[in-house]
Amino acid sequence: MPGNYHLPTDKEVSAMLADLIGKDAPTKTSAAWTPPAGGPLTVATYTNNAGELGAVCICDLSVGGSIGAILTRIPASLVNEGIKAGKLADNLMENLKEVLNIFSSIINKSPHPHLALKEVLSVPPALPDAVNAIVSKPVTRLDLEVSVPGYNKGLISFFAGSYK
């Protein structure tokens, strides 16, 4: 039966982050933002069992780096260095990738088809065509401002497509 892929609520994102980092990570809905062409940002893609793209999560470097850093208590100064350089360090990206993988648990909800993290792109020069198709015309969208305690706040957005 056709439908739209599920996206988490701001409360689900906040609760998931709080569980992971052991501290409240306040979220609030934000105005829709246009991810800048060529970054700097991080893009996670989620595909169904047939390999079809169903959802996308985009983080700016501020929140992506902060989430990656707080997970293993990496100093905020290293996040800020990554922001200035326009690219996060490998250890921050690995930690962020873990969180983006765990996000698949709040993206999946019965009776919608299962989605799994396929890949995480760091500062892509341009969004791949399939990603751009969902980001430019999502069926559903959630834009959040996330505050990471002791680190930065930034923007994270979820975009979902439909299935047949």
Image (spheres, grey):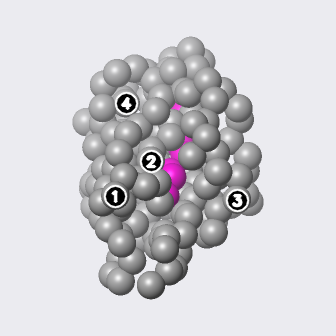
- Residue at 61 percent across and 69 percent down: it is 140
Q: Which mark is residue 93?
A: 4
For label 4, the SS is helix
Question: Which quadrant of the figure has residue 22?
Answer: bottom left
For label 1, the SS is loop
Q: Amino acid at mark 1?
A: Ala
Q: Which residue is mark 1?
A: 50
Q: Are marks 1 and 2 in contact (CB under 8 Å)?
A: no
Q: Which residue is mark 2?
A: 45
Judge depth for marks 1 and 3 and give the one in front.
Answer: 1
* Along the line of sight, the residue nearer the viewer: 26 or 125: 125
Q: Amino acid at mark 3?
A: Lys
Please provide the residue range marked out in magenta: 55-61
In primary-sequence order, the first of circles 2 and 3 is 2
- Residue at 44 percent across and 84 percent down: it is 1
Q: Which residue is mark 3?
A: 137
Judge depth for marks 1 and 2 and give the one in front.
Answer: 1
Q: Is residue 95 visible?
A: yes
In primary-sequence order, the first of circles 2 and 4 is 2
Label 2: few (<14), some (14–19) or many (≥20) C-alpha neighbours in 10 Å? many
* Along the line of sight, the residue nearer the viewer: 35 or 160: 160
